Amino acid sequence: KVESHTCHQVFDLDDIKACVTAYLAEVKTCPNCGIKNTAEFPVGADQKTQYGSKVCALVTYLNQYQLIPYKRLQELMFDVVGIPISQGSIYNILNKASNNLHDFEIELKDHLR
């Protein structure tokens, strides 16, 4: 008869890796009028290279909450996640996050007053 159980837990990480999705747009020329047409890319794939919402959230969290400076954040993203990212891209991600919070900031300040 079993009297009781004891438990040991091991916390670990699954692989942390980047996921890159490539989109191709067909380019065709109309045989009647000769105009070249290019298919549209999906929403969110409007630049040749961009970072998804999870990368942007991680960059914002690590810089704004964990206070990791741009250069160290750039190194961390490459060393841990395998994503090469420039300090300019980090700035752009943080600037976009700030702009997205602009209306909320105004509303919050009004509420606090």
Image: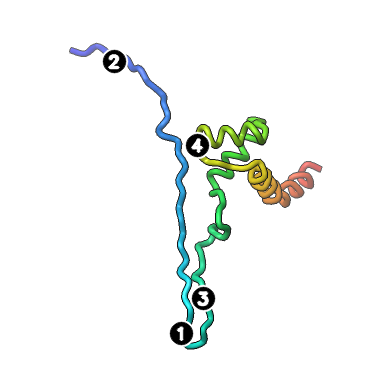
Image location of residue 53, percent across then percent down = 55, 48
Q: Earlier in the sequence, mark 3 or mark 4?
A: 3
Q: Name the mark nearer the viewer: 2 or 3.
A: 3
Mark 3 vs mark 4, CA separation in Å: 37 Å
Q: Along the line of sight, which residue is nearer the eye, 93 or 86?
A: 86
The answer to whether residue 66 is above or below residue 89 is above
Q: What is the residue that sits farthest to the left in this orientation?
A: 1
- Determine contact: label 2, label 3, CB under 8 Å: no
Residue 67 in picture, x, y percent from top left: 67, 31
Residue 5: which numbered mark, if any?
2
In space, the residues marked 1 and 3 are separated at their CA atoms by 11 Å
Question: Label 3: how many residues lie within 10 Å, few (<14), some (14-19) or many (20+)?
Answer: few
Element at badge 2? loop
Mark nearer the viewer, 4 or 1: 1
Residue visible at 70% across and 50% down in the picture: 99
Residue carrying label 4: 81
Q: Secondary structure at mark 3?
A: strand
Q: Which residue is the site of mark 3?
A: 37
